[in-house]
Amino acid sequence: MGYREPTPIQAKAIPLVLMGRDVMGAAQTGTGKTAGFALPILQRLLPHANASASPARHPVRSLIIAPTRELADQIYVNVAEYARHTSLKSAVVFGGIDIKPQIAAMRAGCEILIATPGRLLDHVEQRTVNLSQVEIFVMDEADRMLDMGFLPDIQRIINLLPKSRQNLMFSATFSNDIRRLAQSFLNDPISVEVAARNAAADSVEQTVYRVDGLDAKRAAVAQLVRERGFSQVLVFTNTKIGASRLARLLERDGLNANAIHGDKTQQERLATLEAFKKGEIAILVATDVAARGLDIVELPAVINYDLPYSPEDYIHRIGRTGRAGASGVALSLMTGEDERLLAEIQKLLKRELPVQRISGAPEPSRRAAPRREDDSAAPPAPRPRREDDTPRARREPARAPRGKGPGAAVPGTSNDPFFFKPYEPDPSDATAAEPAPVQGAAAARKRGARPVPALLGGRKA
């Protein structure tokens, strides 16, 4: 795995988890929180490891809840790698994909289950998962789950777990709401904070660039990527449509870019993330769905195309770079309308960020017709005048006004006076124009009119 020394959060949390204590772990994003709870969990579950193929020998003993699909899949990849040389099984379930393969994995048995709240409850309702033997319960990125409205689902899940269990909460930030939630189900927890609350990593260079308007902001992204020579960069927007539009503009400007957001299918999102991790995509434009838990090795830079509405999201965004002590760059773009958002971020960080003016940003390139070799800066020669070319105001009308007979000749039409005459009916057709009586109506007159029923307004007999 390449681990030589534990990070501060790992050094403090792992011994407590091994002791069976409830833990609230707060650390900067990118400091190894996943290994801080996954490694001791595997150590504690090793006595239950067995090579039996029976699902009954592999009940769910550890449940890990994550707010997003991407974070759940990332935790699963890490846990599977940590447990590669053991007989412990792990599985992941999340929405957006077919549930049938997940049902098969649940029926095969697993000791460690990673899930998003909604899809886990789907399995509970279908009775494909049994949580009655869970010994260790983990909530990762708990503040994000509250922001996304998962609190009722979390409470339902907690009610399904055994009363006697170990509880762990790990996150980059802990708001007062999170602490109140922790008091409701944690048993005498030990708080572990290896950095100031809501702090960003010191190894990340943070700079804010002021731009004029939306067009200048789009051009500034391409300019910063080229001037700084970033091999890869993660760009954050606040809206899904904004992410797709920016990715298209960057591609039009000659940059290798793609977008990821909640409107794309889970297969598309996973494929795009995998391509970005492999270096096949240089610029990944994303909403905050990609801001939590994604471990991209040696990501050099993050650009905030839009300043986040929540200042806590700023910490999670820039935490994608400068991970595990490496250096990183976090650049943010702002217009005059973003002053309030910047003030809230600086208040949370308890420091002022340097604000610079970006100038000379090229306009986004637009596809134009290719210029021929003999083209020059001289104005184009005037086109030859046709015989019918006359000033627009002095041109004769194409046809005569109504009611005044045929007008001037119109190209492509007939000049026969017959087509300009008003309609005159033929006298010989007057008799033919009178409609013949309908046979059914004539027969009705012979029979006489039927009386109207009393219910329809007719007279009573």
Image (tube, helix red, strand yellow):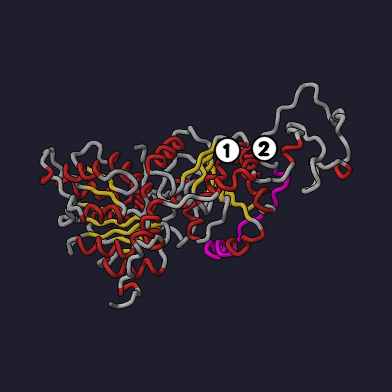
Q: Secondary structure at mark 1?
A: loop
Q: Amino acid at mark 2?
A: Arg
As for residue 349 lying within the magenta part, the answer is: yes
Q: Within 10 angstroms of label 1, few (less than 14), some, or many (20 or more) residues?
A: some
Q: Nearer the viewer, residue 83 or 442?
A: 442
Q: Is residue 53 above or below residue 161?
A: above
266 displayed left or right of 411: left
Of labels 1 and 2, earlier in sequence is 1
Q: Which mark is residue 173?
A: none
Q: Which mark is residue 230?
A: 1
Q: Bounds of the magenta span?
A: 343-361
| Along the line of sight, the residue nearer the viewer: 424 or 260 | 424
Residue bearing mark 2: 366
Question: For mark 2, does the 10 Å Cα neighbourhood hold few (<14), some (14 to 19), or many (20 or more) residues?
Answer: few
Is residue 41 something one can see in this rendering? yes
- In space, the residues marked 1 and 2 are separated at their CA atoms by 23 Å
- In the rendered structure, which amino acid carries the disc numbered 1? Phe
- Residue 101 location in percent, x, y? 24, 41
The answer to whether residue 193 of the structure is visible from this angle is no
Toward the bottom, the furthest residue is 460
Q: Position of residue 423 (x, y in %)?
A: 68, 45
Quadrant showing the C terminus: bottom left
Between label 1 and label 2, give the one nearer the viewer: 2
Quarter of the figure with residue 179:
bottom left
Task: Give the residue at x 40% y 69%.
Answer: 176
In this rendered view, identify the residue nearer to me: 97 or 400.
Answer: 400
- Residue that appears at 10% across and 41% down: 54
Near-viewer residue (206 or 144): 144
The quarter of the image holding the N terminus is top left
Snapshot quadrant of residue 343: bottom right
